[in-house]
Structure formats: C-alpha cells, structure tokens
Image (spheres, rainbow, N blue to C red):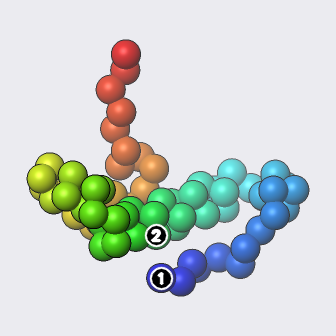
C-alpha cells in the first residue's frame, strides 16, 4: 500500500484546500479498509459476512452511518 500523497503534518493540512484534504482522507480510508480486510481477522470476517469488499468503500461518502 502506497499513499498517493506526501505525508503532511497537522499544520500543513490545516492550510490545504478542502478538496485536497478530502482527497487525502479518501486515500487514507481506502488504505485502512484494505488493511483491515486483508490483515485483521475480526474486521475481515465482519466485512465478508456483510458482503463488503474494499472496492465498496472508496470515499468518505461511501460510509453511511445510522442516525441515532
């Protein structure tokens, strides 16, 4: 897994355009989902049971959380 972005510090991120921050968030989300799916038994089993694959979660908008 290689990020498409150069690592940025928090002060650097705070001064980036919203679109660039969202793109960074989406990239990190994809890496995290891929890692969980392929290497973490609990999340791998959960995602497989629910019929989810990393390709189903590509952006933050793909995460739908119920409102309580």
User: What percent of the width, then of the height, locates residue 46?
Assistant: 21, 52
Q: Residues within 10 Å of mark 2 (few under 14, many from 20)?
A: some
User: What percent of the width, then of the height, locates residue 33?
Assistant: 38, 62
**Picture residue at 29% right of the left edge, 56% below the top:** 43
Look at the picture and state if 46 lies above or below 6. Answer: above
Residues at discs 2 and 1 in contact (Cβ within 8 Å): yes
Tag 2 secondary structure:
helix
Camera-side residue: 59 or 41? 41
User: What percent of the width, then of the height, locates residue 21?
Assistant: 66, 57
> How many angstroms separate mark 2 from mark 1 (CA)?
7 Å
**Picture residue at 81% right of the left edge, 56% below the top:** 10
Q: Which residue is mark 1?
A: 1
**Picture residue at 61% right of the left edge, 63% below the top:** 24
Look at the picture and state if 9 lies above or below 61. Answer: below
Camera-side residue: 34 or 22? 34
Q: Split into 4 quadrants, where in the image is the C terminus? A: top left
* Residue 67 visible here: yes
């Amino acid at each position: 897994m290689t990020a498409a972005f150069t690592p940025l510090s928090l002060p650097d991120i705070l001064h980036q355009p919203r679109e660039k921050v969202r793109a960074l968030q989406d990239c990190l989300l994809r890496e995290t989902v891929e890692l969980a799916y392929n290497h973490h038994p609990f999340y791998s089993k959960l995602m497989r049971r629910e019929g989810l694959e990393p390709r189903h979660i590509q952006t933050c908008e793909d995460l739908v959380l119920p409102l309580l």
